[in-house]
């Protein structure tokens, strides 16, 4: 159930709003002189999800694409489009979520929910594949 909170929490839902995404970049390793500055990252749909291994990790609030390994001259919109070209947020062309009609917002949220389910499915599938490999290895040891 821990995985679900990653996609279905009030915090994650608030990432619809650029101002909330921007607040997550407090410890972002790049400053205002870089193309991937906090404002541009938030505007491109990303929120900051740093880890010890990936201090520049980000996630799109809508397609849940996670990216890291940023360079100072990387453009957030270009990288978002390169790694997740079908993200519905990109189709808004920078239109703030706050200016969407109720119908547009609901359609966007439906897409976000679909993406969350798909991401969760992929995570669980990888877990099961790893478990399958481990069980197969154990079974082969029993035969030997």
Image (tube, grey):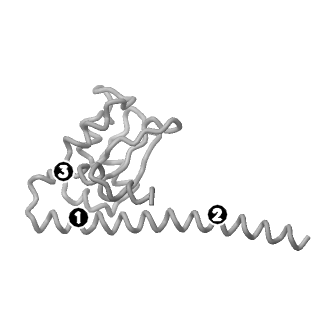
Badge 3 or badge 2: first in the primary sequence: 3
To which quarter of the image does residue 9 belong?
Answer: bottom left
Q: Is residue 12 left or right of residue 49?
A: left
Q: Nearer the viewer, residue 106 or 91?
A: 106
Q: Residue at x 29, y 63 (%)?
A: 112
Which secondary structure, mark 2?
Answer: helix
**Which label sits on residue 5?**
none
Image quadrant for the C terminus? bottom right
> Which residue in the rendered view is the most extreme toward the bottom?
143
The picture places residue 18, in percent across and down from the top left corner, at 20, 45
Q: Nearer the viewer, residue 51 or 94?
A: 51
The picture places residue 49, in percent across and down from the top left corner, at 39, 42
Q: Nearer the viewer, residue 15 or 39?
A: 15
Badge 1 or badge 3: first in the primary sequence: 3
Q: Residues within 10 Å of mark 2 (few under 14, many from 20)?
A: few
Q: Which residue is mark 3?
A: 94
Which secondary structure, mark 1?
Answer: helix
**Which label sits on residue 109?**
1
Q: Measure the C-alpha gap from mark 1 to mark 2.
A: 32 Å
Q: Residue at x 62, y 67 (%)?
A: 129
How many numbered marks have been drawn onto this rendered protein structure?
Answer: 3
Which secondary structure, mark 3?
Answer: loop
Q: Residue at x 22, y 52 (%)?
A: 16
**Which label sits on residue 130?**
2
- Give the number of the mark in front: 3 or 2: 2
Marks 3 and 1: in contact by CB < 8 Å?
Answer: no
């Amino acid at each position: 159930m821990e995985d679900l909170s990653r996609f279905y929490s009030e915090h994650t839902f608030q990432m619809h709003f650029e101002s909330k995404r921007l607040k997550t970049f407090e410890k972002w390793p790049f400053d205002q002189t870089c193309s991937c500055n906090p404002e541009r990252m938030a505007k491109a749909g990303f929120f900051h999800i740093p880890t010890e291994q990936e201090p520049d990790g980000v996630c799109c609030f809508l397609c849940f694409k996670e990216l890291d390994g940023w360079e100072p001259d990387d453009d957030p919109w270009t990288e978002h489009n390169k790694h997740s070209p079908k993200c519905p947020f990109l189709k808004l062309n920078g239109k703030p979520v706050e200016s969407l009609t109720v119908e547009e917002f609901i359609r966007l949220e439906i897409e976000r929910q679909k993406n969350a389910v798909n991401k969760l499915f992929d995570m669980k599938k990888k877990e099961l594949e790893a478990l399958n490999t481990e069980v197969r290895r154990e079974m082969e040891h029993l035969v030997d």
